[in-house]
Image: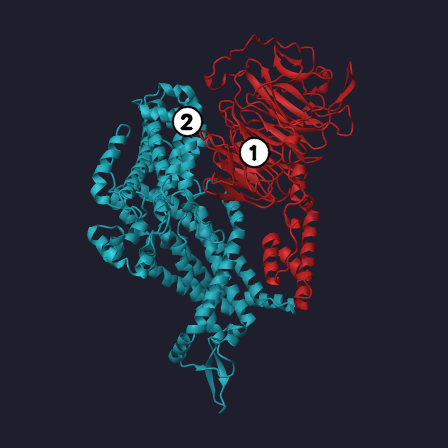
Amino acid sequence: MCSLALFPPPLPYGQTTVCESNNELLSGSSTEDQLNLSFPRESLKLHSRTENSSKAAFLDHSETLWMRSAAAWRDGGLTGLLNEITNSHPEVPKWLSMSSGCILALLQWVSSFHGSLFPHLTLSSEDMIAEFSQVSDCVVRAFAWHPHTDKFAVALLDDSIKIYNPKSATTPTLKHRLQRNVAVVQWKPLCASALAVGCQNCLLVWHVDPCSLSTRYVNSGHVQKIEFSSLKKCQKNSLSFTFNAVLNFLVWDVAAESCVPLQRVGGGGVTFLSWSPDGSHVLASTPSALFRVWETRMWTCERWPCIKGRCQSGCWSPDGSRLLFTVQDEAVIYSLTFTNTPGTSKGPHAAVVVADLSETTFSTPDGDIIVGGEIQSLAWDPRGERLAVLLKGDPRAADRSPIIAVFKTRVSPIFELLPCGFVQGEPGAEPRLMQFHPNFRHGALLTVCWSSGRITHVPFYFLSASIPRLGLSGSPTLPHVQERPADFANQSLFTEFIS
Amino acid sequence: MLRLLHLSAPLLARSALKRKSFMSIILFFLVICWRAAASIAWAVLLLPPSTAIFVILSKFSVLHPIQTISECFSMLTSATAIFSFILLCGVIIMVGFLNFEYYTVIPTIACSKIALFGQLLHPRQLVNSLVHCIMGMIVAWCSAVTIGFRYETLGHPCAQTDGYHQMCLNEYHLILLLGGAFVGFSHSLLGVIHNMNYVSFHTVQQYKYLRFKGCLPLVVKCSATQALYSVRNFIVVYYFLGYIPRTWICKTLNLHLGSSAHPLDSIAGLLDLSLLYHLWISATFLLFTWYITLLLFRIFLTEGYSFPVQSSFTEDADHCLPKVLTEKQPMILKFLALQDLALLSQHSPLRRCEVFSLSQPGGHPHNWNAISKECLSLLADLTQRLVAYHDTVATNGRAKSLSSGSERKTSSETSDFMSPRPTSPLTAPFTPDLDSPFMSPALRRLAAPVEQGSPWYGTVQSPHIMRRVKNFLAKRVLIVYLFNKLPEASSQALFADSQAHIWALEGLSYLVQASFSEDQFGVVQTTLPSILSCMLVLQEAVDRHFKLPHASSKPVRSTSSMGDSTYKTLRFALRATLKTAIYRITTTFGDHLNAVQLSAEHRKRLQQFLEYKE
């Protein structure tokens, strides 16, 4: 089993990781790159997040009961209406206010019962996003590379989305009235323009014309709206488009605007969703200690109860045969293997621990640094050769800040994990989000969003050991990069033998 | 089963005459009739639990819960209950058979109000309404007997002033029966308006049980709300016209009107909460059992069927995928074959291998040739339809004079990659193409007599004389209302059968993608230029179509209806699938596509896709 003790020690204070070359991580002081972006918090015009209506700014105006009830129905639904009726004593007959008060109490009692079954339902949608989303306080709320080209979308704290493309000078900005508390952005595969945005109450699908020169899309006709209450996350595949709701797992066909609910008992919603690269499986974790792996041909699922906590994060190998996942409050990475022929053989019976990332102390010139602990998220590069693990750290202890540990991996013929090193940013900056570029030709490119609002790219230059994908790119033309035979032979590492 | 075979004989005989192939009839029986019969059997099996729930709900009283339960038990074991249950089974079988007889995989889209009226007043539809009416009455009788109490019989003895006993009319029984008939009738009418006989295929494949389980809440909700609306309408009708059937029944059966209670077609009589509840619950029960039958029929019919790609026995050759794909009738088999093609191209490497294989002896890629040719001709057909429609709209309805020109133009455009095919006459602008091979037999039957017999169909198709007549009549408001084209309906009609095209696109693109690594003999490469140019031409036509007014406006979605509104968004699905299909090919082949022979225009277009700029 691979553990953090095998890793080279973290960089001294003030040094940042620049790239991997010749099998080692190179460091340096911060470099300026045109693709490295920075969004300082001060530059954003943040609106007050606690107030979600401008009610307080206006004077109270006496309206008829009828008007107020209509407004309450519009804003707060049935509960709002009942509240309004209950609170306007002198105007309504006594029996009406009494009965609506009783119904209200009954409703609250029922919802509290429901909430005791699924505790996360009692959270407000903002809290729910903060609890289950991968990002919390960062200026950059979500990040997504386009699966085929070099452009990416960044969702910022002021609820706007910017699209950067190194080949074009325009950076379109997307804003929408309903685009609040963006939890996730995702490009549609095999499409140049469609971008799905999971917001607080709905799912927006933007169509950003790559040839258009307009830079601002505000509430415009380029957006397709899929409204849903209490949405948290979304992901999409080539045709079907899956996102989760509080208790349902829905598969959407965006173009036809039809949805199929896939209901199973237990769990209570979906918090994290990950499609395998070949589209054959979907990982869906729930707020309870249970996750499901759906097979996308007949949409059947396997239940995987965890012992400790909910499934925190997961990622798939390029061929969709192996799933790595982490569990809340545990410092290990588990692995599951799947066969690509559904129905013929059952999946595995238990997950295997492939890496132990429990706390390890490194002594550096600046003093001891403790690394390890709970895992926030996982990212695997599209060739299956580098695995980045974002360790949560401890926000209370100064010497245990979040850090990214990178493994070298091999999927075939046997699964292997080797330590590679730590990726560190500027002093004081903590990694928040990370994603690998989907088709970087010279190896792997890890994009990291830092708590300071910077987005940096860390390239890993290596020659791919697997068969070159599709044989189009040929061998990468690397500047002075040679794959050195790994000198980890004397170290213990994780290797899974096929029995 | 026997009854089914007997009743669907005319349909089969017609298709047999057309194709002169006996084998696919056998296949039709093996697959489709078996599925229909299985769905009806399941619907009958589900009847006891739903009846039990209905009995409990109809007899429930809050004050005497124990008494309710004992009453229900004694009710369920009585002889009348068993008799009415047998009646209900008969009704379910009949409903199932009507579903089977009237279903279509291509929706009938009425492009104007008058066309909709034409559909409603068609003799076939009238028969359907009448049968539903009678069945509604039967179900209502069963529920009246089940509820018991004051609803049980039509007549009851009543004492007159002179002490002489005679039979009086029980209006509660009558109102329940009439309510059932009304709900059955409105169910049949709404079936036409909401295209309830349209069977759509789902993008997501699921096992039958899971799909049924997923749809059950929707069915309950739909039947409850629809029953509510129907009962409301019925009460309004009964309030105004209730005296007609009442006096008629009294006359024919020689019954007297009870003098004691006030008549039910008064406000006081209708404001009886218990009566309203019983009307609503029996209407819900009726609609629920019928909807369940419909749902099961749809689920069974659209389940994926795996055709063999090739067979080593010559007598089985007619059952193989390439053969079934090319058949035109029955439509459902063609759709199932296309669905199977889309699934196999995506999920099963072994069957893809058979598609790419060469014949033994001879070494010809017969399977691939047949499949790709059929898919390409489907796509080319749609392109032609779109171009013709666009030309018609551009020339403001002067379709006939330009038809030959436009046809020549399209055929010259497309002839380089497809074999000439008997082209259907130009699609009329406002009505679904009746001569298209995608027309279901049911629709053909439905539409043909109206077209010959009545003047309005001709008018809608606007030949010269009829147009003059129409211009004259158009000044009248009612006529304008009736003849006005419904927005986007013509666009919907144009894409009514696009599910077939979507599968063809998916199947082709996935097969081409897989061929990059799986096609050992380079079978696909020979057709790659024609596939690409066919898709690009279609893409151009679709893009042009979406620039027309109303084409890109989103339809209003109705969620609480059993009618399937998938057909309303098929054109958007087709557009997305087409783009994805081209991207799938360009992403797989990348720069290799520069070696494929294409015209300069198409190459330019393809370059846009290669650079992700579409």
Q: Which residue is mark 1?
A: A161
Tell me the kind of residue under disc 2.
Phe
Q: Is residue A387 above or below residue A262?
A: above
Residue A472 lies, in percent from the top left, at: 45, 17
Q: Is residue B97 above or below residue B403?
A: below
Residue in view at x 62 percent, y 14 percent: A20
Q: Residues within 10 Å of mark 1 (few under 14, many from 20)?
A: many
Which element carries disc 2, helix, strand or loop?
helix
Label 1 – label 2 distance at C-alpha: 25 Å
Drawn side of residue A159 relative to residue B156, left or right: right
Q: Nearer the viewer, mark 1 or mark 2?
A: 1
Residue B257 lies, in percent from the top left, at: 45, 81
Q: How is the image coloured?
A: by chain
Q: Nearer the viewer, residue B491 or B193?
A: B491
Q: Nearer the viewer, residue B243 or A190?
A: A190
The part of the image, by quadrant, that contains residue A455 is top right
Tell me the kind of residue under disc 1.
Ile
Q: Colour of chain B?
A: cyan
Q: Residues within 10 Å of mark 2 (few under 14, many from 20)?
A: many
Discs 1, 2: same chain: no
Residue B539 lies, in percent from the top left, at: 36, 33
Q: Is residue B199 above or below residue B610?
A: below
Q: Does residue B527 show up?
A: no
Q: Is residue B41 above or below residue A300?
A: below
**Chain letter matching colour red:** A
Which element carries disc 1, helix, strand or loop?
strand
Res A311 label: none
Chain name for mark 2: B
Q: Which residue is mark 2?
A: B609
Chain name for mark 1: A
